[in-house]
Amino acid sequence: MTRTTPRPTIFSYCTEPDTLARLEWLSCFLTTGKHLSFYASFGTVLMLLAITAPVALVFGFGGATAARASLWPVRMLGKIYISVVRGVPDIAFFMFFVIALDQGFEWLRHQVKCPEWTDPIRQGNDFIVCAAAKLPLNTDPQWMHEVYGFLIAVLTFAIVFGAFAANIIYGAMNAVPRGQLETAEAYGFSPRQTFWRILVPQMWRYALPGLSNLWMILIKSTPLLFLLGVEDIVFWARELGASKTARFTDYPHGDWRMWYFLALLVFYLAFTKLSEVVLERVMRRLNSGQAVAATSGKAAA
Amino acid sequence: MSCLQTIQDYGLRALGMGERLLPRTDFTLCDQFTLIGSGMLWNIYFAIIAVSCGFVFSTLLALAKASHHAAYRKPAEWFIFVFRGSPLFIQFFFAYFLFLSLKSNVPALGMFTSAWAGAAVVLFLNTSAYSAEIFYGALRTIPKGDIEAADAYGLTGWARFRRIIWPTMLRLGWPGYTNEAIFLFHATTLVFFSGFPSYQQRGDALYYANYFAIKTYNPFIPYPILAGYFILFTLLIIAVFGLVNRRLNRHLPASARRKIRIKPQVIR
């Protein structure tokens, strides 16, 4: 099969793939436009991690602080958040939350934007809001839909992981020795000052082992993006690996999905190993100068 | 249609028995409870296979990891690292496509491309790695005095392992192992969402819950039902493992017994 107009390629020799030797063929194959999207989707995963981790930490901090509050309703809210999210099996929660958040947002917008709408929103099996309340709007370009899907996914991750982080931080706050807080009070610190100047700086050391564990779990949960309909690495690995005939592509090949998923497996293993090494260093740093069992003999002595 | 009729039609639908067509309109609560419950049969099957086989294999792995010989230790360390360091989701996908390409070379291995065998193998290897790490940790915390006492009594080799090391390892590792069993049970929901296709709409509980959520645009009924079933069976696991824990600790005074504390996990 010959093409009249050559496709744009990275290497100049890639215009006639059928004629190439193995290694050159592979280098051309791995730089097709679709493969570049595949590599970009690793960026999507890293971005998800980069956004979710701080947001989940904020949720966790908020949840833990609420669970310690002296006001009863706030305290209950914090405790309910922690225990409900932690008690339900993992992906059921992810599947549930994405639809629920989506419908929640559309319902809120519907209330604001279409007050004259009289039909019920739930008509039997259908969920119907007015066109102006749709999220994103039907007229929006494709990338808006993709970004919206991604943001919903980030929010879901943040809510679920926030609850786990809240539990860890709550435990860490309780682990700070009571005497430290009493000393602060004796020096005339207000509750707010005690919280920010004594409790929060000291709690990190207790929270870090749990949080680093959570980070590992967060890395390993990123393939869930695929379930939430985001075009992530799993999506592209399935897409690119599936067998292709010469009719539809310049690079026909058999079912290579196994090799693509092997590559993903190696990616995750390398990523978790790297995180393990880095977190180990951070931990040693935080513990240096502290007389705790976790430090090595020479630091404690 | 009465609810009893629904249960007769769909109670074993996940195994391919009873009514063939899934309900398409007018979903009743009874439909949802029955079908999701029927899907739970798969989750229970996977959990039982994986945990019972994984228990034996993880003990061997833990012993290998604690071994002084690098020839035993290194493979065990790698196995545990590979299965604990990567997402179960990716493992499912990889295994499914691996089995697919094996099938085209060796047709006898064809059964592994279906969930009942293939996914069970993956879950078995996965839980073995996680449990082995727990048991390895327990092996390292066996009180030195216990082993010295065994030596003093002249126990060696198999007798020492069976009478001293193994029971103590189990006792110390049991609370962690209980959590692992619960976690694995929750992880069985991934089977039909990753790679392994559900043949003739015979899926697990999440498969049917998702079916209802998509058909009715209403996640607020099927998912809570699913969660309810899971909480029920989780309580059952806790009860059974709690009985074993009682037996393992029966020689100890109440204050020295290790309590099982449930620590929910996100995903593996």
Image (cartoon, coloured by chain):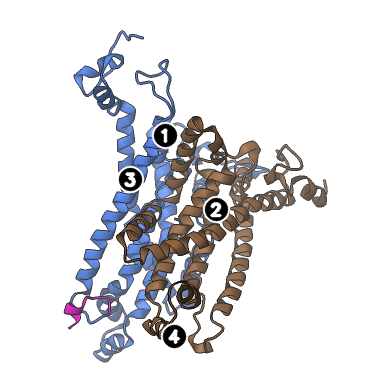
| Residue pointed to by mark 4 | B153
Q: Nearer the viewer, mark 4 or mark 3?
A: 4
Front: mark 3 or 2: 3
Q: Chain of mark 3?
A: A
Question: As rendered, which of B54 and A248 lies closer to the eye?
Answer: B54
Q: Secondary structure at mark 2?
A: helix
**Hey, what amino acid is under mark 2?**
Thr
Q: Few, some or many C-alpha atoms within 10 Å of disc 1 (few <14, some 14-19, many ≥20)?
A: many
How dense is the environment of label 4, judged by Cα within 10 Å: few (below 14), some, or many (20 and up)? few
Which-is-in-front pick, marks 4 and 1?
A: 4
* Mark 1 or 3, nearer chain start: 1
- How far separated are the C-alphas under marks 2 and 1? 23 Å
Identify by letter the chain in blue: A
Q: Residue at image x 63%, y 60%?
A: B228
Q: Is residue B30 magenta?
A: no
- In percent of width and height, residue A173 lies at 35, 76
Q: Secondary structure at mark 3?
A: helix
**Mark nearer the viewer, 4 or 2:** 4
The residue to which callout 3 is attached is: A266
Q: How far, Cα to Cα, is label 4 from label 3?
A: 48 Å
Q: Position of residue B142 (x, y in %)?
A: 40, 78
Q: Which mark is residue A257?
A: 1
* Amino acid type at image mark 3: Val
- Asked if badges 4 and 2 are on one and the same chain, I answer yes
Quadrant of the frame with the N terminus of chain B: top right
Q: Which residue is mark 2?
A: B188
Label 1, secondary structure: give it.
helix
Front residue of A190/A60: it is A60
Which segment is the magenta one? A293-301
Question: Badge 3, how many Cα within 10 Å: few under 14, some, many 20+?
Answer: some
In the rendered structure, which disc, 4 or 2, sits on the residue that comes first in sequence?
4
